[in-house]
Amino acid sequence: MGLAAGDKLGAYEVLGPLGAGGMGEVYRARDPRLGREVALKVLPAAVAGDADRLRRFEQEARATGALNHPNVLAVHDVGTHEGSPYLVTELLEGQTLRERLADGPLPPRKALEHAAQIARGLAAAHEKGIVHRDLKPENLFVTKDGRVKILDFGLARALGGPAAGEDSTLAATEPGAVLGTAGYMAPEQVRGRPADARSDIFAFGAVLYEMLAGRRAFDGESKIERAHAILSQDPPELSASGVAVPPAIERIVRRCLEKSPDERFQSTRDLAFALEAPAEGSGVSGPQPAVRTGRTWRGVLLAVAAVALLGAGTAVGGLWRRAPASPSAPPRPTPITRFTIELPPGR
C-alpha cells in the first residue's frame, strides 16, 4: 500500500487500507467537510502510465458517476493527487457475494431477493445506456442490512459502440478474463462480438444459478475450458444440486442463459418483473393453501346442515312471535322439520 493512516489525499484523510486489486488500492478515509467516512479507490502513480488501466479507471468513474440508484455504488468525487487518480465512493460495510458464497448456496428466498436488487441496478445502468460487461460475484457487494450494490464498472461501455480505444476482440476484454470473468461472459463476448444489455442478462443468469446451486454454472480449470463450456454446454439442472428450486425460477435461469441473445430476456425490466411472480406464487415466499380432503368436505357439509337448521328455527320462532294469542285454545306444538344430508360416497 502506498498510503498510511494520517496521509492526506486532496481533502480526504486516510484512516487505513481496505484492500487492493488489479484496478487499484482502496482505503477507508474521512471527509472532514461533511463529517463522514468514505472509500478512496486510488490508481497508484506507478501504474497510472498504463493506458489500459488508466482508461478503465476513468471509465469506471464516468459510468458509476452517471448512475444514481440504491443498488449501484455511489460515487461522491474524483480527482488526482501527485499523479495518482482517485475515486471517492460511499463506504460499504458487509461482504462481496463471492465471500458469501464461500459458505454455500443461498436459500431460494434470499437468492431471489438479491437477484431482484441486482436486476433493478442493471436496469438503471441499461436505461442510461451503460452495459456493465463484468458482472460476477466479486463485483456484487451485500451490505449488512441486506442491500446489494453493483461494483466495478471498469469494463463498462456505452450501448451502440466500443469504449474509447477499445477494439471488439476477445483480447480486448482479456484483463477482465484474468479476474475470472471467463466463467460469466456471454457467448457473444467469448466470440469477440459486441456486448449489449442481453450480455449482462446472461452474466446475471450465471450469478443467480450460482447463488441457488452453490456452484458455478460454467466451470473449468482454465479460462479456455470455461469459455468452451459457455459456448457448447448447458449447466446441470438446478434440481441436481439437491436444493428445492421452484420450476418458475429454473425457467428464469434457463432463459437468461440461452446461447442466443434473441432467446433471452430482452430487457432487465422484463427480467425484474419475471422475478417478482415466483416470489409471490411459487412457494418461495410462504406456504401455499392446503388442499381440501374428504374430512374437510364432511366438515363443510355438517356446517351447511347446522346453518340450515338454525335458519329454520329462526323462521319458526318469528312466526310463533307474530301469531295472535288465543285464550280459548291451547298453543299448538311447534312442527319440526327433519333435514337429511347425504355425504358423498367414501367421505
Image (cartoon, rainbow, N blue to C red):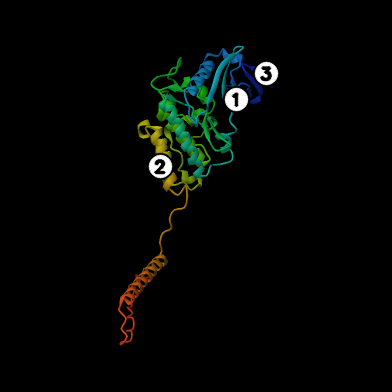
Q: Amino acid at mark 3?
A: Asp
Report x, y in % for residue 72.
50, 29
Q: Quadrant of residue 2?
A: top right
Q: Which mark is residue 7?
A: 3
Q: Amino acid at mark 2?
A: Arg
Query: Residue 120, relative to residue 106: is it above or below?
Result: above
Report x, y in % for residue 155.
49, 23
Q: Identify the secondary structure beneath mark 3.
A: loop
The residue shown at (33%, 83%) is 333
Query: Residue 90, relative to residue 147: is it above or below?
Result: above
State whether residue 225 appears in this view: no
The mark that comes first in sequence, 2 or 3, is: 3
On screen, residue 311 versus residue 26, left or right, reads left
Residue identifier under label 2: 251
Query: Residue 146, relative to residue 150: is it above or below?
Result: below
Kindly report the distance in space between the C-alpha atoms of the residues bearing marks 2 and 3.
52 Å
The residue shown at (51%, 17%) is 58
Which tag is nearer the camera, tag 1 or tag 2? 1
Task: Out of 232 and 45, give the one closest to the viewer.
Answer: 45
Q: Say which quadrant the C terminus sits in.
A: bottom left
Residue identifier under label 1: 39
